[in-house]
Image: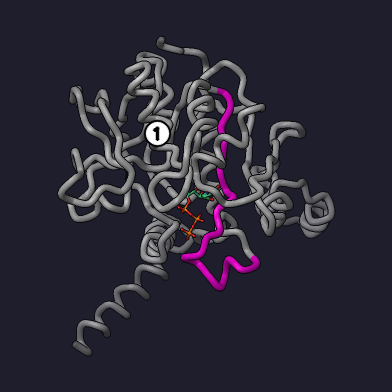
Amino acid sequence: MANRGKVTKAIFPVAGLGTRFLPATKSIPKEILTLVDRPLIQYAIDEARAAGIREFIFVTARGKSALEDYFDHAPGLESSLRRAGKDEMLETLRKTNMESGAIAYIRQHRALGLGHAVWCARNLIGDAPFAVMLPDDVIASQKPCLQQMIESHAETGGNMVAVMEVAKSQTSSYGIVDVKEDMGALVSVRGMVEKPETSAAPSNLAVIGRYILNPSIMRHLGRMKPGAVGEIQLTDAIATEITEADNVYGYRFSGKRYDCGTKAGYLQATVAFALARPDLADEFGDFLSTIVAAKDAAQ
Ligand code: UTP
């Protein structure tokens, strides 16, 4: 049944081990790594707020306390900046403040997979659809990706996953959708496969880290057994929803997505975001041109 309730809650699963960024992630949560001067998690929070999210549910784990501290107000720091007349920095800091009670932290005791992490938040989700956002995926766009999806979801109801075209050779790194009907930005989905080999991929439309899900997904997750790579997969629960309710859509968002869970993606995002900053663009752009020219000359 279409569930068109307003989306005001978002789950941020941040309990993964972040092994691809070891040794940094031995003591720093991956989500605190910065793009220029803002942690990855701040980009996700800003996107969620712009889309109308009011309740932020973090699924965390041991070793992630820096993330919780990041969202605390810092009155000492604020008064130092005020005394020093650093109003601009004070304003930057204030923009990161979250309203008391807007954030909830849930623990995932073992890293049993993204699906399991989402399921850990089941008691905080009522009977309205909710968003899931993976902060690893940073999306540069005019209109925030989640806002695009929520607007489309207001028309369709059901479940919605953000999708983008990938090279066929890349399908084994993503959940891939099997398209029933292609309606342009929106596709209706008849199936989903987690990390298929190229030959088994039903399309080249890959699911990335933005979802709007019905609460029934939690029921499916509660019954899931570990799937691909021994983890409880969110994709498998969404596939069950397709079988039971046939109400899953893919949404081709507009914007550029950076996979900041990989070193290459993280570095690309760092360069792109630095070049987009008026205070850094000239100096950093000149530097990049110089080193690229030097590299070309050396070859
Ligand atoms: P990833 O697949 O990127 O795993 O998880 P990871 O642990 O963060 O990083 P690597 O692969 O070891 O480098 C995708 C998202 O799902 C969350 C992660 O925190 C990330 O936001 N996740 C994953 C959990 O919350 N719990 C899990 O058990 C697994």
**For the point 69% across and 52% down, which residue is it?**
70
Query: Which of the colour schemes (rainbow, by chain, secondary structure, one colour) is used?
Result: one colour
Magenta stretch holds residue 264: no
- In the picture, the quarter occupied by the N terminus is top left
Q: Could you say which is closer to the camera, residue 109 or residue 212? A: 109
The local crowd at label 1, few if under 14, some if 14 to 19, many if 20 or more residues have their Cα within 10 Å, is some
Magenta segment: 8-27
Point out the residue furthest to the bottom here.
298
Q: Where is residue 218 shown, x and y percent of the image?
A: 53, 27
Residue kind at label 1, given as amino acid type: Lys
Rendered position, 32 above or below 108? below
Residue 175 appears in which quarter of the rendering?
Answer: top left
Measuring 23% from the left and 43% from the top, which residue is drawn there? 165
**Above or below for 33 versus 49:** below
Residue 84 position by quadrant: bottom right
- Check the picture and name the quadrant holding the C terminus: bottom left
Check disc 1 and report the residue beneath it. Answer: 143
Q: Nearer the viewer, residue 232 or 65?
A: 232
Q: On the picture, is 151 further left or further right than 133?
A: left
Q: From the top left corner, tell me how far across and down residue 185 is, in percent.
A: 25, 28
